[in-house]
Image (tube, helix red, strand yellow):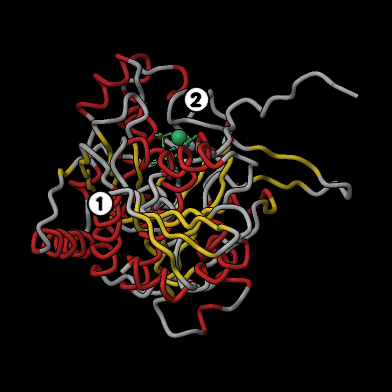
Amino acid sequence: MAGPKLQAPKGTFDVLPPEGERRRALARACEEIFAAYGYAYAETPVFEDTEVFARGVGESTDIVQKEMFTFEDKAGRSLTLRPEGTAGICRSYVENGMHKLPQPVKLWYWGPFFRHETPQAGRYRQFNQVGIEALGSDDPSLDAEVILILAELLERAGAQGIRLRLASLGSIDTRRAYLDELRDFLRGREAELSEEVRGRLDTNPLRAFDADHEGTRVVVADAPKLMESLSDEDAEHFEHVRRMLDAAGIAYEIDPSLVRGLDYYTRTVFEFTSDALGAQSGVGGGGRYDGLVEELGGPATPGVGWAAGIERILLAAGEAGEGQSPPQVYVTPGGFALARELRSRGIRVELEQAGRSRKGQLKHADRLGVGWVVLVEEDGLQLKEMANGEQRAVADADEIERALR
Ligand code: ATP
Ligand code: MG
């Protein structure tokens, strides 16, 4: 019985060819780059106890307050579709006792994430992120390393108009002292602030830096900057990171107002944007989160990492980036076993499987862009070279393979 047409939910999308192949190519690039730096692949569940994000990402963040898909299971437990990857990885680090492994533990992930946002170009409710985390060391070379890796990945993906902004938020103590100072300053000019920023003065005064509200921006321009209150240790850590990036020839801009939308960051934070994207210019970002593992019930453990949006990387790459390799050989009906034999030798083979006439077969082979057609005739195999139309009898897969070389 025919029913009404169904649609994918708002803010979701299907990945179809050739887009699917561009994604797989990007995934292969990720695997190669991460392996070279010693990051190993990990997966965590797509949903977690809501607590993981409430505590991990921070109660006062937009993500937790507005963007999570939260539901109850049949036993009344509150679960949430993961809005980001780091909290889950840290939950897993604690639960699996990874602090007993040699440190740092270096992991990467790739998969779907969920945020209840207004859908628009480059902003979806189900999207995909790739990310890396290095846990268990606060060595500044790790901060520089993760930044280098993302820069390398974006270059390899062909992302256009990439810029990097960088800042340091200081250690947890510095940050806490600064937040008090900032809060006092903002209270002094409370009347000029937006309602939203006023509402969050207690929980998250840093959000003032993110505001679009004109009055708030005027106030914020005069506000004390966190970068100016860094302790000597934090300043030195940041200096190390910068020196390594300079030595690697990575261009960046120091942006003291860079506030990431997650509460867990300490010390280095960074964001890569692309001028090729419209309003949704963020391609990927991250930073150091030295308090997060402890916040989630584990031993005090430093960590640093980033997440990048797959869809935004591909958008920023435009048509650049590799797609699927076309088939090399097209085999006419009757060649099922031969096709299998050729494929086992690593040759990409397309078999005629749609009942076309001989004329239709050759037209299709041409459209596919294959170099060679194997015509399976009653008296044997004919190999046709598409470039010049030449055709000759061949005995078997060996001979075809030789012709292709
Ligand atoms: P934005 O400022 O665009 O909302 P964000 O700061 O919330 O981004 P992060 O939490 O840092 O983003 O996530 C890392 C990356 O994931 C972003 O740089 C972006 O590429 C991608 N991303 C985040 N939210 C979405 C979304 N709703 N749809 C598609 N990609 C997203
Ligand atoms: Mg966001």
User: Mark 1 or 2, which is nearer the eye?
Assistant: 1
- x%, y% of residue 187? 37, 26
Quadrant including the N terminus:
top right
**Position above or below: 256 against 192:** below
Name the quadrant containing residue 152. Answer: bottom left
Q: Residue at x 44, y 57 (%)?
A: 329
For residue 333, side relative to residue 386 (left or right): right
Instruction: Work out whether residue 378 or residue 40 is closer to the camera in this orientation and state it.
Output: 378
Image height of 379 relative to 150, above or below: below
* Residue drawn at (46%, 37%) of the image: 363
User: 187 and 321: which one is in front?
Assistant: 321
Which disc is residue 168 wearing?
A: 1
**Considering the numbered disc 2 on the image, is that residue within a helix, a strand or a loop?**
helix
Residue 270, above or below 114: below
Q: In the shown orientation, is residue 267 left or right of residue 362? A: left
List x then y, in percent, for residue 278.
Answer: 32, 24
Q: Which residue is mark 2?
A: 199
Q: Residue at x 52, y 37 (%)?
A: 360
Amino acid type, mark 2: Gly
The percent coordinates of residue 264 (x first, y second) are: 44, 52
